[in-house]
Amino acid sequence: MGRTLAEKVWDDHVVRRAEGEPDLLYIDLHLLHEVTSPQAFDGLRLAGRPVRRTDLTIATEDHNTPTLDIDKPIADPVSRVQLETLRKNAEEFGVRIHSLGDVEQGVVHVVGPQLGLTQPGMTVVCGDSHTSTHGAFGALAFGIGTSQVEHVLATQTLPLAPFKTMAITVEGELPEGVTAKDLILAVITKIGTGGGQGYVLEYRGSAIRSLSMEARMTICNMSIEAGARAGMIAPDRTTFDYLQGRPHAPQGEDWDAAVAYWETLATDEDAVFDAEVFIDAAELTPFVTWGTNPGQGAPLGANVPNPEDFADPQERTAAENALKYMGLEAGTPLREVKVDAVFVGSCTNGRIEDLRAAAAILDGRQIAEGVRMLVVPGSVRVALQAVEEGLDKVFTAAGAEWRHAGCSMCLGMNPDQLAPGERCASTSNRNFEGRQGKGGRTHLVSPQVAAATALVGRLAAPADLSDNVAVEV
Amino acid sequence: MEKFTTHTGRAVPLRRSNVDTDQIIPAHWLKKVTRSGFEDGLFEAWRKDESFVLNLPERKGATVLVAGPEFGTGSSREHAVWALQNYGFQAVISSRFADIFRGNSLKNGLLTVVLPQETVEQLWALTEADPTAEVTVDLEAREVRAEGVTAPFELDDNVRWRLLNGLDDISITLQNEADVAAFEAKRPSYKPRTQPVA
């Protein structure tokens, strides 16, 4: 019987298989950041163990880093200690690091692909659940905890329980104004935050094949929000073209050998998935979340749902809690929900295409009065590219703030946070209670919806804008 | 890792689904570089509410958390497991756990037990009616017991063996170091390395 993409990559990394034991898998690339690694390095020190493969390990600073005044000492002493700890550990153990101020610094899941370190058929891990991003290249990539970080540092392997496979097939063309973000938000709402549990998802079909690498990364990034182990997309010409010429991409004969291997990875025609989900791309519209988990979403044209309409008692209670926290009334059209802040950035939507999409909508317009908008590039390289294209000027002219690279307002670990009760349209990945700051309220959206929302001051899609003037409801 | 064989203690019924790891331990706590001292951050936002179940005097000293489905979703932060352990929890019962959280818990000796939602409801009813009711989580017998409840649970044999013996995963893997070296010798040359390139 044929094998799926995920099964092929898994099989090619089995170091040891024995009855009654989990498979021991080799890890090709280990990404580190400051938050989930200090206790792992401590463990190595305690046991007197070295990092087995420093040449397969790379660190960057992202979660704690400020996006303003990066030339000054970090104001928060606890954040400063955590960053200094990573720097000390990298030096002591001989790990390559890109610190704040370095041209290769940025969000770990933006840095790996742009350096060409993420390639098809690899196993990629990081102490960060959004490691699923790298699956866009046909890599088996997943987030791990700190104990596993230590395990990989010490052994370059992980014992792993077997997984199931789920095909998410999206056929057809995405309608105008509908993006990869809308697609993945719709998938998560459809299968639920636990729907992918135990599965590696493979996104397939004509709508997926027509997407750019950036868009594919957005989709795979949020696989974890459906509870999945990982999300993958078969490598194709789009993947190879993105990789060729990047600093760590293979060259010469190695390139040819690599491509020959990568071309064997796609799921065999006679392979069988454990579960299948079908989505008609033509039916998708801009999608936003209304609740406090990423599965609580709806088309922008819908109303805030009524908890009583949920048959499942757990879901009903969750919806009641969510509306209370979010300060929303059931039945309110989502387009009438006013926002205080807009955030464009993160490992989900902080790449150059995302910034271009937002800039195209903001160009020549002014964001609504009283709305604060942060645009945060995913990496220094993305920032430099944006500046070269003049996007930074578009953002600042529209009234948005153009910041330095980092995780920023995706999570409350650095100075960029919402105040209690503030409502934000955010291109990030989690709308959990307090995720963007204590008491903050998050609506997950695409970069296009974020930009249109900033202009109107209420949740909006680009189609709602009439020329230069925001449409009044 | 501490051994886990069997544990008996009072329970905290947490009637919430989709308790994500940002709720278990908010991000600002993650700046600490130790594995201890997270107890005050556990469910920090909810604990500001006096009526939150963890704040009730009769729940003081409880060691078994009985939670709603999809417990531990979201961020991979192992700090969520440390926070539960630092606070004093020895076991968590739910009908569904997020994968990464579950893996993290079992690597730290925090036993996460999957039981059918109806059994979770029974345990909620029992421990809400009688806060002194004790719940036993028996890993040797693979069984949860409480008044009127005897519920078998499944756990992978290998994981159970490691927990029962408090074994360190890294030491076990390093016993097979020769397999790792043999695999490395055969890796293709086109696989990337992280050293800076010119």
Image: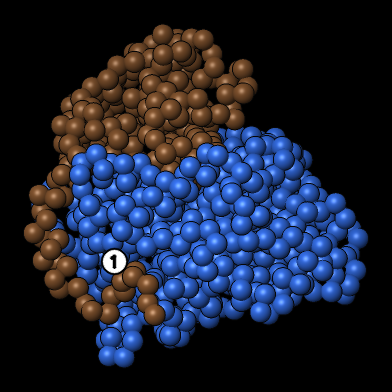
Chain colours: A blue, B brown
Classify residue A175 by image quadrant. bottom right
Chain of the residue on which disc 1 is drawn: A
Mark 1: which secondary structure?
helix
Instruction: Relative to A195, say whether A201 is above or below.
Output: below
Q: Residue at x 52, y 51 (%)?
A: A63
Image location (x, y in percent) of residue B54: 51, 20
Q: Which residue is drawn at 48% across and 59% down?
A: A99
Image location (x, y in percent) of residue A25: 22, 59
The reply to whether residue B178 is visible in this rendering is: yes
The quadrant in which the C terminus of chain A is found is bottom right
Image location (x, y in percent) of residue A308: 66, 38
The amino acid type, in three-letter code, at marker 1 is: Asp
Q: Name the residue under label 1.
A: A55
Q: Residue at x 14, y 45 (%)?
A: B172
The quadrant in which the N terminus of chain A is found is bottom left
Residue at the limit of the structure toward the front, as seen here: A72
Q: Nearest the camera: A18 or A71?
A: A71
Left or right: A382 in relation to B158: right
Instruction: Relative to A397, say whether A417 is above or below.
Output: above
- Badge 1 local density, few (<14 within 10 Å), some, or many (20+)? some
